[in-house]
Image (spheres, grey):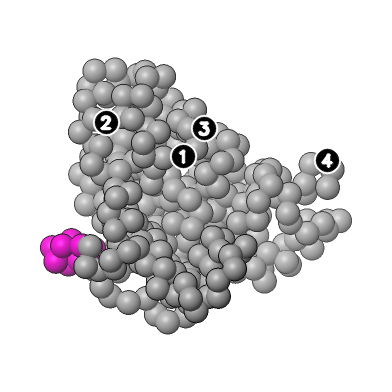
Amino acid sequence: MTGEHLLQGRVWDVKNYDFIAPETLVAKLKPARFILLGEIHTNFEHHLKQAEIINNISDFERHPAICFEMLEVTCQEKIDEYLNRSPHDAEGFGNAIDWDSQWNPAYEMYKPIFETAFSKNLPVVAANIPRTLAKQAVIEGLKALSPEFIKQTGISQPFPPELQKELIDEIWESHFGQTKHSRGQLLGLLEGMALAQKLRDAIMAYTLLHNQRSEKQVLIAGNGHARFDRGVPYHLVKFGAKAGLICSLGMIETEWMPEYPALPEYQEWLKVQKLPYTFAIFIPGHTQSL
């Protein structure tokens, strides 16, 4: 495919089956208490768009908290210490919090988001569980978690069967496409990985709901976590948040998408897709991710 894709830069309103202008998107975000900005982690253009949205949001909300899947809750003290010492310096933030030990890709990919947050004096919040705990959950299941933690997150409550199957299907396809083992042989591992994914979503939802640094929360996370059907929004609603106060945006890469000669045809195609977000933003890239 050559040239600019017809959907490049466009915003799709999933509920109303229509394209909307970027300025309309900003207005629609205003009533939301929880705004989830999805991404494909390796797409720098997605991070630039997230930074742009945060900048626009901060024009009508003075101090929304910016929460990150990429940061483990255990590093919040380091974050606060750095911001007290160097509140406007995004350059040294990655090294100060030891970003590379927590997340890949590198901090430089995400620096535009932090530059925007720091320039607006916005709270920065670590929202994810430690990797070590997620790995334990994959291997040991709920035995890896304390009774208090299980009660806090409601993680022992099972997904509806169809959502559990969809999640395991997705993990199988994305992680084991080239394996020589059968799905049955790896079922225990798949269920453990599904639990870890669910655990991340639950703790991020809990963090957003109980964070006292701001009334409005913005979450930077992968598209899968931003899904309304079984991602962070699912758990927010389970914890008592009103669905109408949650807004999720999926960042969709355009290179893989079908080629239609006109936008109305894309509009009909998108109606069938039933994207699991409030809005979808189409950005250049190379990987399919709905």
Q: What residue is disc 3 on?
A: 109
Q: Are marks 2 and 3 in contact (CB under 8 Å)?
A: no
Distance from Cα at disc 2 to Cα at disc 1: 18 Å
Disc 2 residue crowd, few under 14, some 14–19, many 20+, Cα 10 Å: many
Q: What residue is disc 1 on?
A: 104
Mark 1 or mark 4, whichever is nearer to me: 1
189 part of magenta stretch: no
Q: Is residue 68 visible?
A: yes
Residue at (39, 80) in percent of width and height:
160
Which residues fall within the magenta stretch? 145-153
Residue at (56, 41) in percent of width and height:
42
Residue type at numbered disc 1: Asn
Q: What residue is disc 4 on?
A: 3
Disc number for residue 79: 2
Q: Earlier in the sequence, mark 1 or mark 3?
A: 1
Q: Earlier in the sequence, mark 4 or mark 2?
A: 4
Q: Is residue 60 visible?
A: no
Q: Position of residue 120 (x, y in %)?
A: 37, 26
